[in-house]
Amino acid sequence: MSFPRYPAYKDSGVEWLGEVPEHWAVRPLKYVTALRSGGTPSKDNLDFWDGSIAWASAKDLKRERLDDTEDHITQAAVDAGAAELVPTGAVLVVVRGMILARTFPVSITTTPMAINQDLKALVPFKKVHPAYLARALQAAAEESTRRIDEAGHGTKALRMDAWTSMPLPMPPDHEQALIAAFLDGETTKIDALVAEQEKLIALLQEKRQAVISHAVTKGLDPNVPMKDSGVEWLGKVPEHWSVSPLKSLAEVGNGSTPHRERPEYWTENGYPWLSSTAVNDDFINEADEFVTELALQECHLPKVRPPAVLIGITGQGRTRGMAATLLIEATINQHIAFVRPRAASVHVGYLRRFFDMAYQWMRFESDGVGSTKGAITCEQVAGMRMPVPPQFEQVSIGCYLEAATAKIDALVADAARAINLLKERRAALISAAVTGQIDVCSAVAEPA
């Protein structure tokens, strides 16, 4: 759909805005809104917490309209001056935190609430529409991030003097309302399309997991006699398969991280060293970092030779439990385990798919364990009981799953590309509307 442009434009005098409609104004942020700060009531005072008043922090700004929050405070906290409420229609932004390294979230309050010190509430002045202000800040996200500095310990923080001086396009108030309503309608349509693609991805990923699990535990012959594996989470397996602990089939171990302040441990072209990010790829055929022979010896780093599978074993993120096939000789850090089959006992392609199948079980068994709030030990990996088909069946299952998952992965990639295009269109539409590159007033007035 194409949209009309305004009849006349003028130079805004602002590089990122360019030309704006002739009758629009351009005003610094501080001239169109009042900023309100937040704080955190004492955690030691139990009378201040678990009440009925929403208390927003960065983790809550995942929705454009905010009607509730994860944490709540009591009226006692407000009465004691430990927090104050911002009104309905305030625009919330994050002004401090590592989230600013990735995104610039913007939300509008639909109920009075308190905020913490990492947020600012922008209360629009008269003749400034809250929803338009929120959209204008979304359009200016890149410009806002240019005004970010690093605070202590590398934390990102907006420079408030520079940010509040940032110019924003300001149409007459009746146009602001029209633009906000138009964008609400158009973005709702786009969001529905994104949701459909996200649902498709979830269904495809469920199908992928089911295909892997069935092949790894039931094999490829639907008529084969079955027996109880003796392992609850594995269920039945083909009668002619064995079930063995991994430690009898493969070597299991992990590595370490040489001290970063010891330059004699690190080099640009030494022995490949892998961190836990390596398991985000299906196959590992290169490294970004390298260590010296001295590091290998003094830090007791294993030399892991293919064929082998690497598994993420720590952390709260999705890498814990993820597996990848190692194609190069390398060493690893302490957040990865290697599983290297003993000669001819297990085919590496089948072994890799066993760990793909066991992903959720490994996460469940390791959830909340260790200093990283999630860890599975090498001993636990070695103790896992694994169904073991004859060698020729392992190869067949591995080849079958390579082809089957490749088809599903291609469909997931198509859906992900569609989501990216939709999000790009969404952002472009918001920017075009709030900067006056399209005449929303004329567009909504045109007959259908």
Image (spheres, rainbow, N blue to C red):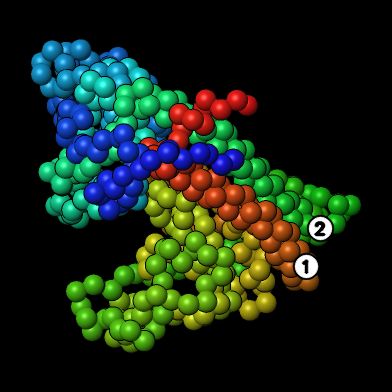
Quadrant (top left/top right/bottom left/bottom right) for the N terminus:
top right
Q: Is residue 282 above or below residue 181?
A: below
Identify residue type, mark 1.
Ser
Q: Nearer the viewer, residue 20 or 188?
A: 20
The residue positioned farthest toward the left in the image shown: 81
Is residue 393 among the parts visible in the rendering?
A: yes
Q: Position of residue 289 (x, y in %)?
A: 36, 76
Residue under pointer 1 = 396
Q: CA distance from mark 2 to mark 1?
A: 8 Å
Q: Secondary structure at mark 2?
A: loop
Image quarter of residue 175: top left
In this image, 226 relative to 375: left or right? right
* Front-most of residues 390 and 93: 93
Q: N-terminal of the two: label 2 or label 1?
A: 2
Q: Which residue is mark 2?
A: 220
Of 219 and 229, nearer the camera is 219
Image position, residue 121 (x, y; %): 23, 29
190 and 297: which is toward the camera: 190
Quick one: which residue is furthest to the front in this view?
7
* Spot occupied by residue 114 in the image (x, y as percentages of width and height): 23, 23
> Is the C-beta separation of discs 2 and 1 under 8 Å?
yes
Name the residue: 74% across, 56% down: 215
Q: Residue at x 42, y 25 (%)?
A: 178
Q: Is residue 279 left or right of residue 236?
A: left
Q: In terms of image quadrants, where is residue 398? A: bottom right
Left or right placement of residue 397 versus residue 281 in this view = right
Against 255, residue 290 (above or below) is below
Q: Is residue 109 visible?
A: no
- Residue in the picture at 19% in, 47% down: 157
